[in-house]
Each structure stands twice: as structure tokens, then as C-alpha cells.
Amino acid sequence: MKFHHTPLEGARVIELDKHGDDRGFFARFFCKKEFQSAGLGINFVQANNSLSAKRGTLRGLHYQIGRSAEIKLVRCIRGSLYDVIVDLRPDSPTFGRWFGEELNAENRLMMYVPRGFAHAILTLTDDTEALYMVSDYYAVEAERGIRFDDPWLNIVWPIKPLEISLKDSSWPSYNSEFHGTETLKGLL
């Protein structure tokens, strides 16, 4: 695997190292030793699979707090999606910044999302399927979110989000929820 740095501290885009012949190819999409060598030690406890039927479906911006804060490894296995991460770690040099990358079935890129980041996907094609591994079990009481169109974040989406759940469209803006970084510091 090739671990590419992103503009956000600790986040990576991961490229598969494919070995192929006329039959196709073989590639690892996770190897604990390789992740540890790249400084990304993790212990995944859960794998999730999502299917979004329509282009323009937005899921996020989600994150979990406290002991339930998650590391995620996200891969698109069918279709195409725009994966967005936001650094919410108050002590980080990239606090408050976002980064997006197109993940699709052809490029086979993956997004490594560190603890303390909000995460969202926006589907760019119909019938988009994502597979992602997480380091902690889902805890409903620890789930939080931020509006996808929060003016403070100013995320530039490649297409207009068209399908959004009631929960995701109801998340508060960052500033109205936290009123500064000191409140957030205690949550992560």
C-alpha cells in the first residue's frame, strides 16, 4: 500500500499496491504491519457496508465523542463518492480545515480518517456502495454531527446534495453547537 499525506494532520489517502497479470490483480487493502509502519496503528472492531441508490445522496458529517471516537478506513467498492473529512481536534495545526477526495470502484483509493474528525460521503453516481472499517463500536449516545453546509467550514461539494436524511439535515452548525474550541476539547 502507498500512504499519501493529505493537507490535514494525520489523515491519509491510501493507494493499493496491485500485483496483476492477465487474470486480473491482487492487492491488500489492510495489513496491520503496513499501517503501523506508516504510523497508523489501529485495531478495527467493526466493518460496515452502505449502499446509496441515488446520485447526490449525502451521509454525514458524523463523528463520535469520548471513548467512542472512531478511526475509519473508507473504500468505495461500486460507483463513485466524494469523501470529506473535517479536523475537529482543537490542538491540531489543521483544526477546522476540511479535505475531500473522490473514491471510486476504478481508482480503489481509500481514506484513512483519524479520531477527532467529522466524516461525510456524497455519492457521485447511482448505486454507490462503500465499505468501511472502524476502530470502535457504534454508540448512539456518543454520536454527533455538523451541518454539511455549515458556513464556517465552507465545504465545496462537487455536486449539490439532493438526498439527505432528516437527521443529517438537522445537525447544528459548528459555532452554534460548540461556541468555541474549549467546549469541543472536552468532547474528544
Image (tube, helix red, strand yellow):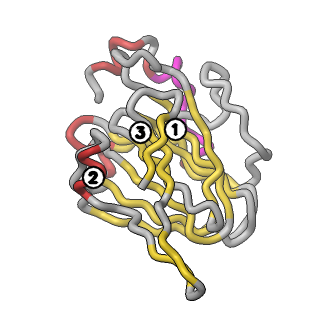
Judge whether 143 appears above or below 125 on screen: above
Query: Which residue bears the numbered disc 3?
Result: 144
Disc 3 residue type (three-letter): Arg
Query: Which residue bears the numbered disc 1?
Result: 85
Query: Which residue bears the numbered disc 2?
Result: 135
Mark 2 nearby-residue class (10 Å; few <14, some 14–19, many ≥20)? some
Quadrant in which the C terminus is drawn: top left
Residue in the picture at 26% in, 21% down: 186
Q: Nearer the viewer, mark 1 or mark 3?
A: 1
Instruction: Determine which of the numbered discs, if any, sits on residue 177 in the image.
Output: none
Question: Looking at the picture, how far across and down is residue 179, in whole percent?
Answer: 45, 13
Q: Is residue 166 visible to us here?
A: no
Judge whether 168 appears above or below 56 on screen: above
Disc 1 residue type (three-letter): Ile
Question: Looking at the picture, how far across and down is residue 129, in whole percent?
Answer: 58, 69
Quarter of the image where one finds residue 107: bottom right
Read off the magenta span.
168-177
Residue in the picture at 33% in, 12% down: 182
Give the camera-side residue of 57 and 16: 16
C-alpha separation, residue under disc 1 versus residue under disc 2:
16 Å
